[in-house]
Amino acid sequence: MLSYVIAVAVTLVISIPVTFAVTSAYRKKETETKIGNAEDKAREIIDDAVKTAESKKREGLLEVKEESIRAKNELDKEIKERRSEVQRYERRVQQKEENVDKKSDAIEKKESVLAAREEEIAKQKEEIAKLNEQRVQELERISGLTSEQAKDYLLKIVEDEVKHETAVMIKEMESRAKEEADKKAKEYVVNAIQKCAADHVSETTVSVVQLPSDEMKGRIIGREGRNIRTLETLTGVDLIIDDTPEAVVLSGFDPIRREVARIALEKLIVDGRIHPARIEEMVEKAQKEVEVMIKEEGESATLEVGVHGIHPELVRLLGKMKFRTSYGQNALKHSIEVAQLSGLLAAEMGLDIRMAKRAGLLHDIGKAVDHEREGSHIQLGAELCRKYKESPIVINAVESHHGDVEPQSLIACIVQAADTISAARPGARRETLETYTTRLKQLEEITNNFKGVDKSFAIQAGREIRVMVVPEQVSDTDMVLLARNISKQIEEELEYPGQIKVNVIRESRVTDYAK
């Protein structure tokens, strides 16, 4: 057994190297064979590649040759086209040059013709100048006027024509404006006047107190005139006791003081006890009554107009206006009337009626204090309205109702118109005879100073001026301008309530006799 194992081992030891050597030799031979095959295949592949590259090269060369031939053909074609285009341009340029040459020749011919004409024209101008000079000399000889005189004559004719056209234009514009606005304005104003029928009271500077008998005059005078002196001192009013039966006259420019004196004197007459202490007591009571009366009158005015929410101080000042007059027209009655007219006009125009009434009622509020403080009633009224927080519309209406400030609302214009209507109403205001006659004289003097005016007459209590003109100096067209110039000068130089109508009259008569 052991020997068997050893034999097997020896066999293995011998067979393994032999097998390895045989296997290695076989693999080497097989490998060499594969390598030889691969080399052959590689050579075949390289040969095929070389053949393919040569064929591709030949094909590329052919394509390049064909492309170059095609590009050359296209280039040749383009060159031919460019040459033909250049030839066309050359032909055009040549034609243009020929045309330019022809035109230059024609221009030269024209210039020569024009030069000849200019020479001819220059000669004609010289001849015309000579003929014109001869014509002017002949005209001057025939007309007997120099050239300057003739120019003046022509200018005068042109001036007259322009004046005529201006007058016609003004007339047309005025008529057009009147057609559009006059009808409505008249309608509004007439309706307002018809609806507002106010009473007019003319105040004076004296008050009359009736006495039960003439014996009362002595009691009023008192011992050594003590009673009358006390009353005059306390009230600031003069007592006039004359031969007038059963009457005493109170004289004073302050209506409130005069009213206090009247009430106090009437109380003393009723009481019968007239002495300095009693007079002082009655004057004090009368002052309180007048204050209450002032307040009541102010409240009554606001209720009558229908205006509420006015400051109590303004209401008191309204009441004081009952004792103020302007040209004889009661200031409070005037303010109430203006407020009512303003409300009516505002209703016609579709505006705020309450605001219009408020502005109309307060437009003259400054008259209640203008004798106590410096400044016009317009300035004082505007200050009072600002002080007591009235609206800007009311303040502007107060400031502008006499044209001192430009109106900024339609309500301000309405108040201005209502103030004019109230003041211009017949019988509303009165003036002193001296003031009245002075205004009439000034009216006539203003109109008489105009050229062409023969006579002038102030009529209708100074509301109209009638002007008679010389027909030879003033034409029909000049009348329009003359009336306008007269009205403007009256506006600049005179102060007057309402408006003044300027009526220019021209009369031309021709008389002849048939024999």
Image (tube, rainbow, N blue to C red):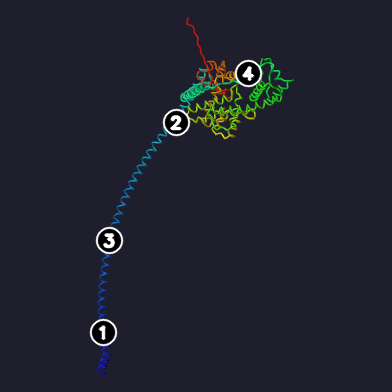
Residue bearing mark 4: 434
* Mark 4 to mark 3 CA distance (whole Å): 133 Å
Q: Secondary structure at mark 3?
A: helix
Q: Residue at x 50, y 11 (%)?
A: 510
What residue lies at 63% left-to-right and 18% top-to-bottom? 434
Question: What's the amino acid at mark 3?
Answer: Glu
| Residue 165 in sight in this render | no
Nearest to the eye among marks 4 and 1: give it: 4
Task: State the image coordinates of residue 207 (x, y, percent, origin top left).
Answer: 64, 20
Mark whose residue sits in front, 3 or 2: 3
Q: Position of residue 201 (x, y in %)?
A: 58, 21
Classify mark 2: helix, strand or loop: helix
Could you tell me how far apart the alpha carbons at marks 2 and 4 are, in whole angstroms?
Answer: 83 Å
- Is 371 situated above or below 66? above
Q: Is residue 451 above or below residue 108?
A: above
Mark whose residue sits in front, 4 or 3: 4
Tell me the residue that label 1 is attached to.
23
Q: Position of residue 404 (x, y in %)?
A: 58, 29
Question: Tag 3 or tag 4, which sits nearer the N-term?
Answer: 3
